[in-house]
Every structure is written in structure tokens, then in C-alpha cells.
Image (cartoon, grey):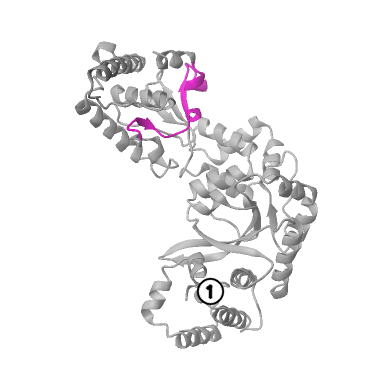
Amino acid sequence: MRIVSDMVIADAIIDVREIEFIENIKNKYSIKKEDEILGASYTLSYALSVLIDSTDSLKQELIEGLINVSLSDNYCSREEAILLIAIKICLSSTELSAKIISMNTSNIFIEPTQILYVESEFDNDINWEINEAYRELKTEMRLAGFDFVYIPKIANHYRSITASELLRITEFLYPKASLERLQTVTKQLQNLSTSEFCKDQLSGKLGVKEFSNVAPSLMIKIGDSFVNDKRIANFLILEIDKNVLNTVRNSVDYFSHYYQTSNISRLKQEKGRFIYTGFYKQIFDLYMLQKGVKSSVVIDTYRNVIRFPEADVQMEKLHRREKALYALFLLESASGGINFVKPETPRQFAKYKKRMSAIQTKYRLIYQKFGGEPENAPDISIPEIRLPMIALIKKQLKAHEEVLFHVDDYMIQRNMFGNYCVNIHPSLCCCCGLDNKDVTALSDSIEWQKISAL
């Protein structure tokens, strides 16, 4: 029912003959009202994943029925054609290997005329071939009514604009964003890579886990579904079979069998010309979207804040004691974290006391950097003092769970070895100088490393 209903509403016109087709499907497979309701809660990708395991005869019957309904008014629209091809490729035995992915794109609109090259790990051979045959690939897709989107070419376009000009444009387009965030995003856009875009943006920010481990493929939007009243975008992920040009030609031939386009893309890139439409706008909107942002953590003792610059947020409602504690854990996590468990033997206990004394000394120094008197720093070796502070830090981080990518990684947590630590890479743990643009990793700061070495 999910597949059939998506096919019927693909062109936004519901013909009487299409309603008759639905009635025949319901009668043939004994589909009841509750089945229709259940089908409306499924995504297209899930529906197809179930049907892939069904009999070949059932899949063939469905494909033939979908072809008939798409041609019931003697015309197959572009939307019907692309959806039909995607379903046929996924359910039939063809030379093309593909799957359908459904994702919630309520925060960003993705146009249906683009074919995006995706990969989670850089494939040298395929990228070399794309660069060699780029004009031919672009022409093949353009004649079929598509824009070929190759991330490295997008990055080249952004690099053709000077950093100062690009910053001026983004300030105009996103007036609410902080200067620091705009600088970060423009730098990211000028250094775009396909694998980074797939893992950090499509997988991390939009939450589509398949893109964290996707083979070199072409990603084509095939339409939208309404799932539990939410608009869900559906994409065909067409795996590249060694030869990119052959994969593109085969897919274009499939498409042309059902639909001949009269719309050819006219979008042009020119040096110094900023394009703010199509995929260029979508990339900007996605990077500026404050959701699932993989951010560094900056300890800014000069302004008494701990901030996440790429996400444009900071820790709120914390006293210097909690800020100092969080900074201590960021520092100590690079060497495995802090273990507060008291040993049982006297000899081990003496070592434990010495270690706790060093930890408390480090905490006092950081507490002082946040403007406190060292002698007034709480004793963090006492659980009744330390644990409520950790809980408060966790609560304030939770407030940013929609913004930060895997917010749990930013929290102080006890690992399998019994050590309390923050589970983000040390390169993301930073400090700030007198100038708030003077940001360096804690591991590169002489001042912080002196504290760490105590």
C-alpha cells in the first residue's frame, strides 16, 4: 500500500483509473482498512526492504501493475517515471545495484533534479574517472533533465571567491549567525569533500546512518512520501559498478524509456559569481542548520564561558566550579580520564591519595583561571560534591542535544574501565586566548599542558 499510494500521488494528480487500480490491489491481496493505516506509517525504503524478500512472481506483478497505473492516462509524468524506475531497479534483477533511502528533510528542501555523487571513503579510481569524464557525465545527465552534483567541483567554486567576499555574502544571507560561525562554515565549504559531507552532514546532521558507510554511488531524489503526517524524501542510491560513465548511461536509458525530458538545466558556474540556488543553496542551508553539528569545545577563561563555536551555542547556567570541572575532564580525557574508585590495599591507597591530590591541584588551578580563589575550590574527590556537579553539566548539555552531533559524546561519563571522561577526540578540545579568535587545541597549549603534567 505504501508503494502503490506513493506511485498514485507522485504526479499530484489522482485519476479515477488510479483509484480503480488501488481497489483491485486491495481486493487481490485482501488488504483491509487497518493495513492501509499501517502502510501509511511505513517509509518507502522500509516497504521495499520487506518486498525484496518476497517471491519473484509477486514482485513482477507489482511492477507490471505500477507500469499500467503510470500509463493509465496515456502519459507517464517525470515524477512517476523516476519513482517507477527506482522501484523496478530495486525489485528486479538488473545490472544496476541499488537501494532506496528515506530521510526526514523537514529542515532542508532538496530539489528533485539533482544527481549527487556520494561515498563515505575516498575512492581514488572512481574520483579520477569522474574528473576525467566530468563534462561528458554532466552532459549525459543534463540531457535527461538532471544536474550532476560533484562536491569537489562545488568546493572549487567556493574557493574561486575570496574568503572576505564569501564572508560578506554569508553575513548578508544569514544575519542571525555569529561571525565566528560564519567564518567556520565558509572555511568548511571551501574545503568540502564528498566523504566528509556524507558522514558529517547526511549521516550526522540529517541522521541517515546509511551514509556513514556508503559505497561510491549516485544519489537521486525520487519523490516525497507523507509518513505519519511528516514529509519524508526518498532517494535512489545507485551503486557505481566500476565504470561511472556506464552506470550513468544505463540509468539515463532506463529513465528515457518512460519519459523524454524537454527541460535542460541552464545553471552555470562562473568565477566570482556566487550561486545561491539548487544544490549550492542546499549545502549552505545544511551547514548553517543548527542541528547535529560536530563542534569543537572552547574553554574561554578570559570571558568565563565554555562554548561550541561551530554550533553557535555555549554552556549556560553553570557556576565556575562546574566549568572548571568540565575543563578538567576535557584535559584529562586525552590520557584516559579520571578514576575515583578507592583501592582496598594500604599501598595502593597511598598512590590513590597522591593521584587525587594532583587532580585536586589541577582543578584548583583551572578554578582560579575561571576567576575563583584556589582555596575555595570544592573537593572533587568527594562523591557527594562531584556527582551533582556532573549531573548539572549533563543537564545543560542535554539542552543542546538537537544542535550537537551525538551530544552524549560531550558528556562526562564513566567508561568500561571505570574512568570518568569526555568521549570526543582531543583535537576538538580547545582553549582560547585574549583574542577570542585565538583558538588552539589543549594539546598545543603550553599553559594547559603544564597543568596536565602536574
* Residue 312 versus residue 122 in the image, above or below: above
The residue positioned 42% from the left and 71% from the top of the image is 40
| Horizontal arrangement in the rendering, residue 374 relative to residue 107 (left or right) | left
Q: Position of residue 11 (x, y in %)?
A: 58, 73
Q: Can residue 277 be seen from the camera position used here? A: no
Position above or below: 240 against 404:
below
Which residue carries the number 1 mark? 9
Total count of labels: 1
Q: Position of residue 21 (x, y in %)?
A: 53, 85
- Magenta segment includes 450: no
Tell me residue 123's x, y (percent): 68, 46
- Residue 120 image position (x, y, % from top left): 59, 47
- Asked where in the image residue 340 lies, by quadrant, the reply is top left
- 313 vs 169, nearest the viewer: 313
Q: Residue at x 42, y 85 (%)?
A: 30
Residue range (magenta)? 417-445
Q: Is residue 355 visible?
A: yes
| Residue at 40% across, 65% down | 228
Which secondary structure lies at badge 1?
loop
Nearest the viewer among 276 and 309 is 309
* Quadrant assignment, res 323: top left
Does residue 12 appear to the left or right of 400 in the view shown? right
Quadrant showing the C terminus: top left
Q: Is residue 318 above or below residue 67?
A: above
Residue type at mark 1: give it.
Ile
